[in-house]
Image: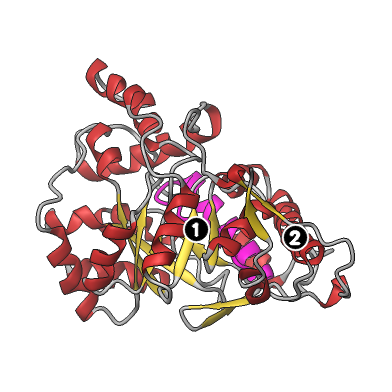
Amino acid sequence: MISSSPDKITQTEKICNQHNFESYPAVNASTNPSIATQSRKADHIRICLEEDVQFHQTTNGLERYRFTHCCLPELDRNEIDISTTFLGKRVGAPLLISSMTGGTEQAGIINYRLAEVAQHYKLAMGVGSQRVAVEKPQLADTFAVRKCAPDVLLFANLGAVQLNYDYGLDQCLRIIDILEADALILHLNPLQESIQTRGDTNFKGLLDKIYQVCQKLPVPVIAKEVGNGISAAMAEKLIAAGVTAIDVAGAGGTSWAKVEGERASNPLQRRLGTTFADWGLPTAECIRSIRAAKSDIPLIASGGLRNGLDVAMAIALGADLAGLAMPFLQAAAESGSALHNLAEVLVAEITTVLFCTGNSTLNDLKHSGTLEQRQ
């Protein structure tokens, strides 16, 4: 079992709380690429927290399933084990704090709070795109959370499309080093870039460049969408290119078409944001199709997961980890204690699913056949 929320501030939290971001440069929109990137990071946090940017018509697909209740589980709930191993590292629960932010004062505070709770519960964690840290090295510390999370599974992050914009092995190594990361996420976001102001839309020849990076990096590479899903066919191509794991990041949660539409600088971009607000493959569909095609690929489910029941469903469908972003972002923007409360609830919800389906481990749940499609 995972230990409960601390009654007093831990030593790790003290280290996090001592960090001072006040000397970091203010964010002002500009045509300067590095300042524009930093400004975009600030906009993303504000819009996600303040505006309605969730999918409305497209769901994550999990509502089509339900667990078979077991009225007599023959288990001691206190002995249920929800820990697992991913990319060779043990995590206390099948939870990934999904990639969100970095590069601004507020983002740095959020990342340090997330890292502290990840360390306490031994959760996996990813950071937002570190492109801004390459462009402005003085902002690298807003991502450098290893001091707060010495034991967690930690993922660096870069947009794959940057490999077509003068980025290569050196930049990938730099962001891995900033984070002391266990793996590198290369995120794929053609729809977001299409709607984003001055978006990077040259995706031509990227698969070969991903292959070259995968061959030379000292850590595994994870391919991740940002909320529109990865099909089984695309997953197979990415795996053939050397990608070690897939994060489906399916439709049903935050719509980055909507987010970019909210900050669009002209009517055309705003229209695109509205038209494609519900575009994408539902998360559940992505999990099932990829797992059917590749039974052994390490698989992360994200996209519209909001509670521990969603997490358990994703695991039962075939995922190995489940990533949540919006719930963690909302709690982190509030306080460290709100984050601990959220982690406690998620752990309790996952444990309850196992107990009430008669399963003592996540592996048992995966092979129990207790998740069925609704009639």
Q: Amino acid at mark 1?
A: Ala
Q: Which residues are magenta?
A: 94-121
Left of 18 or right of it: where is 71? right
Q: Position of residue 144 (x, y in %)?
A: 45, 65
Left of 254 or right of it: where is 362? right
Residue that appears at 20% across and 66% down: 210
Residue that appears at 39% across and 42% down: 41
Q: Is residue 309 visible?
A: yes
Magenta stretch: includes residue 373: no
Residue linked to disc 2: 353
Left of 294 or right of it: where is 315? right
Q: Quadrant of residue 157?
A: bottom left
Q: Position of residue 143 (x, y in %)?
A: 43, 60
Q: Position of residue 92 (x, y in %)?
A: 66, 73
Callout 2 secondary element: helix
- Residue 212 or 356: which is nearer the viewer? 356
Residue that appears at 24% across and 57% down: 160
Q: Position of residue 77 (x, y in %)?
A: 86, 71
**Front: mark 1 or 2:** 2
- Residue 59 or 133: which is nearer the viewer? 59
Callout 1 secondary element: strand
Left of 64 or right of it: where is 224? left
Residue 167 tag number: none
Q: Is residue 19 visible?
A: no
Q: State the count of labels.
A: 2
Magenta stretch: includes residue 115: yes
Our reading of the magenta stretch's main secondary structure is helix
